[in-house]
Amino acid sequence: MLIASGLYLWASLTEQGEEQQIRTQLQGTHHLLHARYADTPQTDWPQLTRHLQMQFAYPLEVMSLAKAPHVLDVPSLQHLDQGGLVLSPDGHFSYQRLPGSADVLVLGDFSEPEQADLALYDSEHVDAAVMISIFIIAIAFPLYFLVYRLWRDVYALGHMALAIQQGELAVAAPAVSTHLVRPLREALSSMATQLHGAMEGQRILSQAVAHETRTPLARMRFALAMMQIADDDPEGAALLNGLKTDVARLEQLASAGVTYAQFGRSRHVTTHRLDVWRLFEALEQRFPAVGDSAARLSFQPSHRCTLIANRDALMLALGNLIGNARRHAVSQVVVSLHAAGSGVVIAVDDDGPGVAPADRERIFQPYVQLQRHPDGFGLGLALVHIIATKHGGSADVCDSVLGGARFRVLLPHA
């Protein structure tokens, strides 16, 4: 409100000042013209008007006082009748009564002077162009270069942050020229270095533990195989079988840990052109029907297509998804292939209990199990996620049309 009032007051003062300036400039012109008309017989005024018009850059005419009410308001008419100089409301015309007559001298329209009499620098268009050019040179250009430098540095740091998000922790920090974003560059660089050190230490530790446990586990298995339990000792036989089961699980955990570490430390996987139908045929042979009580497994490729992928890695990921679905399904598991924009989606549906929305991201983290299972370690879905990521895709879970969960692996087209 204050801004609007201030602008209105300033516009009013400016308008009044301009009107007074125009009236002051025209007083001398009207005085000289009145003297010419006073020295000329009234019958010669039309000829004098034409002669004067040739010397003026704007129109000039003598109008009857009776026509004044059509163009002026009452206060202006009173001032005009008293011999005063009157301007039209828009300031484009001036009126003053010629002494001793019922005629009015009219000058204008001042807004449209003859173009031939104007210098180039007096043109309104040239004036506006010059003002705009000055504005661009004085303000816009420096502002543009300042914003461009800031945008360039932020864009480079954005690429660095995206690389860190994708796991490229050894990415080099870009050079920046703007002091404002240099602290951000240093913070990102320090964060990437610390993450790289932590992840590398975790990888080395997990890989070392997985490798080093294989040898003692092999010796334990050999020792258990050499142990003999008497036939009349069922409790000892049960303990021995339990030990064998635990050793087998530890061996499976070590093998899964080594596999996860191998995919985790490799930046890219070796890929080749792969026929999805043949991949489905191999999976179907790997998961044969195991009885009437097991969930029925079916493959439904919607169309034939090829992928640029690592066959062994993709077999491992899909095998983990199918095995996980068969453990939780009630009666059926469906593996399907669908087109999705610039890639394809391989989906594994089941009619089991599904996955709650709050757990759909957490379930892909290593060693996370929503339900404890004797054959699982929480690394299967983590491997699915990391394999999909290494292929330039993604993995997620949502609700299935079968009523359970749908695990999806999105991969780019060949």
Image (spheres, rainbow, N blue to C red):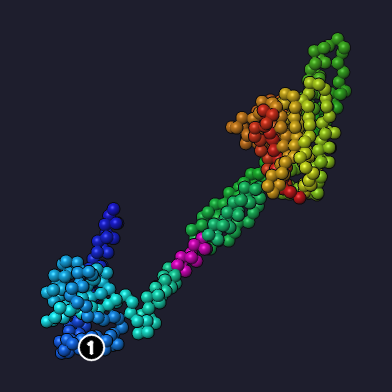
Magenta span has 142? yes
> Which residues, given as a range, are shown in magenta?
140-150
Residue 35 in sight: no
Residue 68 in sight: yes
**Residue appearing at x 57%, y 52% in the figure:** 188
Q: Is residue 259 left or right of residue 110?
A: right
Instruction: Classify mark 1: residues with Cα within 10 Å, few (<14), some (14-19) or many (20+).
Output: some
- Please, what secondary structure does the residue beneath circle 1 have? helix
Image quarter of residue 88: bottom left
**Residue appearing at x 21%, y 78% in the figure:** 63
Where is 13 relative to 383, above or below? below
268 or 24, nearer to the observer: 24
Magenta span has 49? no
209 or 151, nearer to the observer: 151
**Residue 211: x percent and y percent?**
77, 37
Q: Is residue 53 left or right of residue 127?
A: left
- Name the residue that disc number 1 marks: 48
Residue at the limit of the structure toward the top, as seen here: 232
52 or 149, nearer to the observer: 52
Amino acid under disc 1: Leu
**Residue 82: x percent and y percent?**
11, 74
